[in-house]
Amino acid sequence: MSESFLLVRPYYGVNVHSDAHGEFGTVLTGNEVYPDLPLISAATVLAGSEDHEVTVIDAESDKLPPDELLAKIIGTPVDKIIIKTSAATIKCDIELIRKIKESSPSRYIMIAGQAAKPVSIWLASHTDIDEIIDEPLDLYIYRYVNGREGTIDDLPTPDYTLADYRKYITEEGDIRLSVQASRGCMMGCKYCPYTQFYKAYETRSIDKVIEDLKTFESLGAKIVQFRDQFFTYDKKRVQDLCKRMIKEGINIKWTCETRLDSIDEETAELMKKAGLFMVLFGVETGDKDIIKEYNSNKGDLTFQKDTVRMLKDKGLLTMGFYIIGFPEDTWDSLQNTYQYAKDIDSNIAVFNEYMNFDTSGIEDPSPDIYCSFSNTTNTYGTSILTRDEIRYAIGVFRENYTLEHDCLKKAYEFDHVLMAKYQAKVSELLSCGNDLGEISRIIREG
Ligand code: SF4
């Protein structure tokens, strides 16, 4: 008799790009929905096994309130339930699991996602969760099903039809799916959450990536997001991949994330021809001492500026990421970072709050290290600036940058109206504590 699994991504009122930030997840302010690639890949491995059955519930894409999700889970007779958690939702996830157990004590429940890893001892001793998966879910399931370790090259083409993939859409309504040609990064930036969760750099064969892309195209995907952490690490491989995409006539627009110090003009030209429309890259800080402290040298300012100019000249969109609020940051260093961002002059600049996931100094870390519905943690330590000061700086930088690179109307609509709406919603959700009934009411009331 086959063993049945239920794989669940819950939803508590805000969208979470749950495989971002090293699978800690990133809360989104808008309505777009990103798939969780490791969850879909894990489900695909189970679906392809004669000895297993799988059902996927993506409550985020369905906007399913937690009380309805709970009823659905309880009403689905499976052997094992896996809840995909994130830093922003783990406290609600624990409450959801408590309620499942309250109703059906014998259900076998597992929790997956990097957010579970630092608090695994606490979860084992304070909850009835049966198993904590402290590694990427797809590779855990691959080993479970096949009895041996795998890499991303062993995984089948993600079967997005196991979920309602038509709901993985951009703000414009285009279907956007995720793919991975490589996973991991060897550069060792100290703040990087990916290196803590993924093994060393591993690749997926070009033949398989092409097969993935053709499958996604047949499903109507207009955009694909390469979820590689360092897409252009191996330029020859990237060029070979792009040549194959062009040869096979793949008609999908795509984005990738990489380092500016690894893109040359020839590779950028080929990537553009193969459908690339946006390059995302981390710059992080304009402060040389902080760069050194965090082992994060990604090229000097002139080189970074020239590379961004080259990409823009080719008609590519550029998005730079900056970390605001390193423990060493001062008003002056933040000002330098903003000036640095202006000098680099990417089309879009994203200013994120520094997230300290280092729990080494905390005895038995509990889920209280995470801030619900937020892209940050409570493990704040000895920072020079206060959180209020850092958040103020982020708000000012965000609005100014949009204003200087776009227009007053967009700065008002995006940085003012949308952010105010999002912050009001988060305040309302936080006032519910972990009361899933109240959170459900807020979701239903829209
Ligand atoms: S280059 Fe990017 S992905 Fe690689 S370790 Fe640094 S921050 Fe992480």
Image (spheres, grey):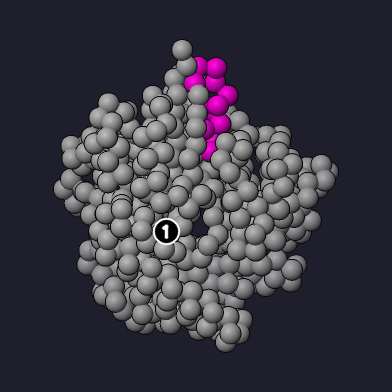
Image height of 434 relative to 446, above or below: above
Say if 109 sits above or below 50 in the image.
below
Spot occupied by residue 242 in the image (x, y as percentages of width and height)? 74, 48
Q: Position of residue 169 (x, y in %)?
A: 61, 55
Viewer-side residue, 333 vs 173? 173
Q: Quadrant of residue 438?
A: bottom left
Callout 1, which amino acid?
Arg
Main secondary structure type of the part rendered in magenta: helix
Q: Could you say whether the residue bearing mark 1 is in a helix, strand or loop?
A: helix
Q: Please state if 101 lies on the left or on the right of 335 as rendered.
A: left
At 31% from the left and 53% from the top, the residue drawn is 437
Q: Is residue 225 visible?
A: no
Kindly tell me whether mark 1's CB lies below 8 Å from ligand 1. no
Of residues 92 and 347, the one nearer the viewer is 92
Q: Magenta includes 339? A: no
Magenta stretch bounds: 40-52
Residue under the point 71% across and 53% down: 222
Q: Residue at x 26, y 70 (%)?
A: 383
Residue occupying image coordinates x 54% and y 21%: 49
Residue identified by numbered label 1 = 444
Q: Position of residue 53 (x, y in %)?
A: 50, 24
Q: Residue furthest bottom?
A: 408
Q: Is residue 217 left or right of residue 156?
A: right
44 in magenta: yes
